[in-house]
Amino acid sequence: MSDLIADLPKGPLTPFRETATFDWKALKVHLEGEESIKFKNEVYAVLSRDPIFARDFSRPSTDEYREINHKRWKAVLEHQFIDDFFAELERTQDLLEILETYDQGLSGRYALHANVFFSAILTIGTERHAEILEKTRNNEIVGCFCLTEVSHGSNTAEIGTLATFDKGEFVFTTPHDGAIKCWAGNLAQSATHAVVFARLIVGGKDHGPHAFALQVRDPNNYRSLPGITIGDMGTKPGVWDGVENGWMSFSNHRAPLWTLLNKGCDVTESGEYKSAYSSSRERQSVSLGSLSAGRIGANACRLAATIAIRYSCARHQFGEKPGSDNERAVITYPLQRHRLFPILAQAYVIRLYQSKLMNHFREYMMRMVGGEKSPELAELSKEVHGLSSCTKPLATWMGVAALGEARTCCGGHGFLQSSRLNNLRDDFDPSQTFEGENNVLLQQTSNWLVAKKAAGGDLKSPMGTTDFLVDGGALVDGPVVRRVLGAYTWLVHHLIAKTEMRHKELKAQGKSSFDVKNESQIYTAHTLSIAYGERVMLSWAQAFVDDAPIAFKSVLQRLVNIFALDRIEKHLSTLYIGGFCSGGSFGEWVRNTLIDEETLLAPDAISLVDVIAPPDFVLNSALGSSDGRAYEHLMAEFRRHTDKRTPFWGDLATFLHHKQQSKL
Ligand SMILES: Cc1cc2nc3c(=O)[nH]c(=O)nc-3n(C[C@H](O)[C@H](O)[C@H](O)COP(=O)(O)OP(=O)(O)OC[C@H]3O[C@@H](n4cnc5c(N)ncnc54)[C@H](O)[C@@H]3O)c2cc1C
């Protein structure tokens, strides 16, 4: 096992490791699999030897960031870790996980080209786009994804860019500033190609937004093509400064017909529009379905838990008796554990959930790309969309909140650049907005759930995530997760009923269906999506624990229990108001059991962190290093800035001198 996973250095964390009730290396192998660990080891070894990936805690300028990001991206491609992004989906996910933990800006640059641009063309293009896919695979071009415009992000149906059929070509125009494409990562400086969404106009008729694979720059001289203007959006916080989010406008840019990504629709040479979709809404949902690929992935909790729990073991404050030898590690305080262990539990549960979702998603993509058209696939498509539309918000909200909490759990030193926590919080922050704004996305889930329940018939679904709706849910006894799942089942039923009731009330008041949706979000549809997403995450994580070998069962169960209790605690008011329970006993049970579980998890906490922690050079945190020698790393950084005479020392000395003179 030591060949596969290196031993960790001895030091201040050793006593905390010695209390573990399980073998951390064996759990790592069980969770990730030998193949995946070997591949990641290979990548880590290559990156740690390549000087372009060396870094310290200093903050580069925007231009330096962009250049280093470009060089690192090029190095990742040159190292040829992946031959085919699509055929090697698991390796691609592993590589993206490494890049995301190393630097979100780098993973953003890589994923926009290899994942977002490529999957959009693969899923909504046809054989006539094979060449562009091949060039993407071979990295002969750089791709980006241009959907958002200055005045429209979430409401993609109202984008304003036009692609008008004219004499066997499309003419792209930007009718006003609000229709300028923006936010597209890779666009401002590097992209040669873009998937561009524009309204298709044929014979004067507006057929709504369609996707096109356009060349936007000449790769030989990096000038934009005629009729295209490209610019940069300015500086951004954290590593996103290294990602060139760009804007683009069109002025009669002409492109050939083949650029239309034509799965299910096309325009003939003579200007006839054909579509296999019953509505532009259906076509739009197929076009944007490819974005679901990005709606999974959450390393934020993992990084937050690693840095803050390791530091909390190394950091000692207060003790019963005076004297610094008697001070306790801050991790021993129940309040610190109550702030950090739910984050550790989230890191595990999100991961377990993701790996199952990826299996379903892979199968779904294969069937889609294979051209299957079956009622079961249509149901699966709705379910993938409904589920990812709530678990992406949940995972990203948990992640950003975790990084904020982790930073304060590390006190003042947590605020330093060298802790990396504030930076990470900035880096993960936009994940709450891109690939679908979280609050807007949640509406997709509740719409789907309410419609599914209203349609009656079979409530079961291809992935089984709505099967529980068949049963009403009630207060039950038994193990923690069984009890909590009972509460969630009741909660989801209750919230569907509340949402439907609110719909009826609003309709009776003569409200439009638009207002009905908007006015039934707060405490109803919005909470419904959250409760359903959490329930699925919890039940999938529990299924993993049920199948786990005996050696890890109890420690994993404890983590899943903490996740269950921490999440359901946030719904206690709704459970009481709705009448699921009365008196204090259920609420008291949730809270007391959570505290008990956190106490029982303590001996295993640091080893659970070791299982999910990236190597130190990827983590790049003075506080979170695996040797636990936080003060030594901090002091090494402090000493790099010793006795540096400020460049304005002369001006300061003159100023002080004048002040002294004027007093005389
Ligand atoms: C770092 C970063 C990278 C990005 N990369 C890309 C890219 O590569 N390509 C690309 O095309 N785009 C990209 N985007 C854009 C991103 O996809 C959009 O910002 C996102 O879809 C949200 O749209 P918006 O900004 O228009 O927000 P808006 O929709 O304007 O949202 C503003 C606020 O209004 C609320 N709101 C909106 N509608 C409703 C409603 N019906 N009910 C209740 N509340 C509502 C939202 O919750 C939010 O609080 C990126 C964005 C960021 C920050």
Image: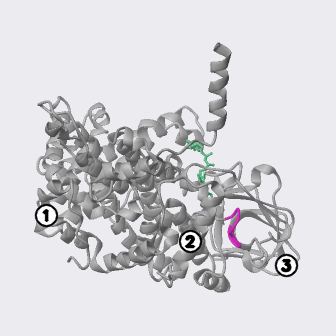
Residue extent of the magenta highlight: 187-195
* Residue marked by disc 2: 73
Query: Who's the residue at 28% across and 55% down the image?
Result: 538
Give the Cα separation between the discs numbered 2 and 3: 38 Å
Specify the farthest residue to the front: 664
* Residue marked by disc 3: 168
Specify the farthest residue to the top: 664
- Give the SS element for disc 3: loop
Disc number for residue 22: 1
Viewer-proximal residue among 325 and 548:
325
Residue 341: x, y in percent? 25, 48
The quarter of the image holding the C terminus is top right
Instruction: Say what amino acid the circle numbered 1 marks.
Output: Phe
Give the mark nearest the N terminus, 1 or 2.
1
Query: Who's the residue at 46% across and 51% down the image?
Result: 640
Instruction: Say what amino acid the circle numbered 2 marks.
Output: Trp
Viewer-proximal residue among 212 and 500:
212
**Image quadrant where residue 580 sits:** top left
Give the Cα separation between the discs numbered 1 and 2: 38 Å
Question: Is residue 21 in view?
Answer: yes
Give the Cα separation between the discs numbered 3 and 1: 67 Å
The quarter of the image holding the N terminus is bottom left
Residue 26: x, y in percent? 19, 71
